[in-house]
Image (cartoon, helix red, strand yellow):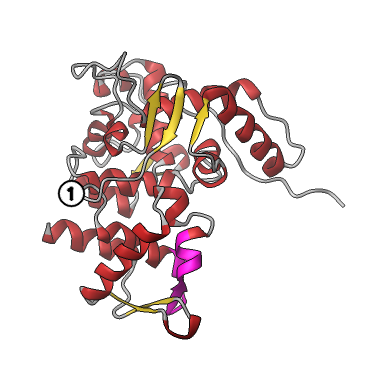
Amino acid sequence: MAVKKVKFKLQGHEKFALREGWVNKALIIIPDAPEVFLRKDATDMFGIGSNMVKSLRYWMRAFGLTIEKRSAGVELTERGKLIAKYDPYLEDPFTLWIMHSYISKNKEEATTWFMYFNHCDADELKKSEIEAILLREVKKYVAGQNFSEKSLSNDVDVLLNMYSKNKEKSDPEDKGISPFSQLALIKNIDGKYIKNHPNKKSLSEMIVLYELILMSKDSEGVSIEKAVYGENGLANIYNLTSVMANDYFDRLDAAGYIHVNRTAGLDMIYFMQKKQELNILEDYYKNR
């Protein structure tokens, strides 16, 4: 029986990490010029080189901010429209966390990001060790389909550069630094990449509520086990410990968003007033 092909993508970014100011330009330009990425003057409109334009087109899609409309170009998703309206300059860490949430689960368009955050469990690794783990995981996922190991290596380079700051090379005036380094999820110390726990001041409890809504789909609740340790769970995507995650659950319970039931070994989270995930985003932006 033929193995069903899965969708995957490596190195859609032309070897460029997302840079400061790129998303802002795209959020402003795309609503009035959805065909911008197809235009000959796209480099002038964005103020970047042609390969960077291709990279930006990929990043907007990988972060769930645009959808492709074939010959008509691209348009902003509902998520993209909300960010364009409330935080187009990505000044609020909340927005970066929402974008991180999307790409780290985007198995089809950002396969390496998905594999790194969901299947690279060790907290302290050299780049070569990360590559070896991800090579194994991608091979398992694509089930015999061909892919370039060099592209995977380039993905790992971009991912690590995007999320981490190397003190020896970091320059505060360098516009090439990715805004995602602000999240401080990965630290580079002496050639080893260490997964960090997020800063509580940076990671709003509304991000955790957003994740719980996504996990629960059509059900009335979600188990604490799944919420913390499941695929795309809080431990994988945000590097939260069980203690940290339960602290967020308790804060959301106290605020009336959820009810946490730990009696009789149930360990379940139920929603007091279940909203759509995009409503969570808009509520946050309106009330911050």
Can residue 56 be seen in the rendering of this structure? no
Q: What element carries label 1?
A: helix
At x 42% / y 40%, what residue is drawn?
Answer: 61
Q: Which residue occupies the extreme right position in the image? A: 1
Towards the viewer: 69 or 80: 80
Is 288 or 164 nearer to us in this picture?
Answer: 164
- Picture quadrant of residue 96: top left
In the picture shown, does residue 78 fall above or below 157? Answer: below
Is residue 284 shown left or right of residue 108? left
Residue plotted at (57% across, 35% down): 9
Q: Position of residue 199 (x, y in %)?
A: 26, 46
Q: Residues within 10 Å of mark 1 (few under 14, many from 20)?
A: few
Residue 105: image x %, image y %? 48, 49
Of residues 81 and 181, the one drawn nearer to the viewer in this rendering: 181
Mark 1: amino acid? Lys
Q: Give the range drawn in magenta.
A: 215-228
Image height of 77 relative to 286, above or below: above
Taking the image as shown, residue 172 lies to the left or right of residue 214, namely: left
**Residue denoted by label 1:** 85
- Most extreme residue toward the left, as rendered? 287
Q: Does the magenta stretch include residue 225?
A: yes
On the image, the x and y values in percent for residue 252 come to: 26, 69
In the rendered image, the vertical position of residue 74 relative to residue 216, given as above or below: above
| Residue 245 horizontal/vertical position (percent) | 36, 60
